[in-house]
Amino acid sequence: MRPVTGRGKLRTGELGLASKEPFLSLLYLQVMKKEDIITLPNAHLRQKSARVHVVTDDTKQLIEDMTSAALDWEDSRPHEISAALAAVQIDKLERVVIVRTDFETKENRDFTVLINPEIVKTEGELVADYEGCLSVSKVYGKVPRWTKIRVRALDETGQPVRFKAEGFLARVIQHEIDHTNGMVFIDHIKDQTDAFYTLDENGELQPLDYHEHIENNENLWT
Ligand SMILES: [Zn+2]
């Protein structure tokens, strides 16, 4: 799968200034920002997204918008990386997901695109580990996920792809496919009193008091 390089495309546009109205079209180009990412209690996050039947220029624009928003969010966070994003998170209810090509470094800003992603098979075991979400402010959780999965999807050109994923990548893909089905990570741990955390100013996860911050938090559950 070829990574998406939204920024590269923008530069190509700027080089193509020989035509008549490039300045105008550049002026109207709106770049998605972190403010375009919707957060709970926005009810759209609990709605199912629609399958993509044909990959069009609109789909490509959607992917660019998702990439811009995810990177803008990351640039505002000292301790976190934008590992992935689902289209619903910029309020487009389509089954499109972008996943960071390299989780280890912020320098590599490429994402891999998965359209209509599905888990064909789960393998290994269920292991609980920490997760956060760009659409859930200040709340983190220890969520059980399958350690190995087999995935079927379309790539950004509409070609079918199948692959295996494990570890953190498998976790991220399960989190994103949940988004396409209207599920948020906290829904998996709704009743677990010891599974919720917040991030302190040093980037350390600290346990949250379930009864005080989670159980009756209208932002999370309405
Ligand atoms: Zn998320």
Image (cartoon, rainbow, N blue to C red):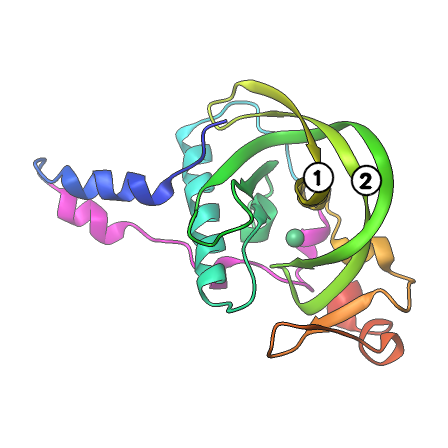
Q: Tell me which segment is drawn in magenta.
A: 21-47
Q: Quadrant of residue 133?
A: bottom right
For residue 5, side relative to residue 82 (left or right): left
Check disc 1: other Cα within 10 Å, few if <14, some if 14-19, many if 20+.
many
As rendered, which of 59 and 5 lies closer to the eye?
A: 5
Q: Which residue is found at the position 68% from the left and 53% from the top?
A: 45
Tell me which corner region of the image, top left, top right, bottom left or bottom right, holds residue 7. top left
Percent across and percent down for residue 148 are: 77, 34
Pointers 1 and 2 in contact (C-beta within 8 Å): yes
Residue 85 in magenta? no
Give the amino acid at mark 1.
Ala
Is ligand 1 within 8 Å of the beta carbon of the residue shown at mark 1?
no
Under tag 1, what secondary structure?
Answer: helix
Q: What is the x, y in percent for residue 108?
A: 43, 47
Find out if the beta carbon at label 2 lies less than 8 Å from the nearest ligand 1 atom: no
- Lower sequence index among marks 1 and 2: 2
Residue 222 visible within the image: no
**Residue under label 2:** 146
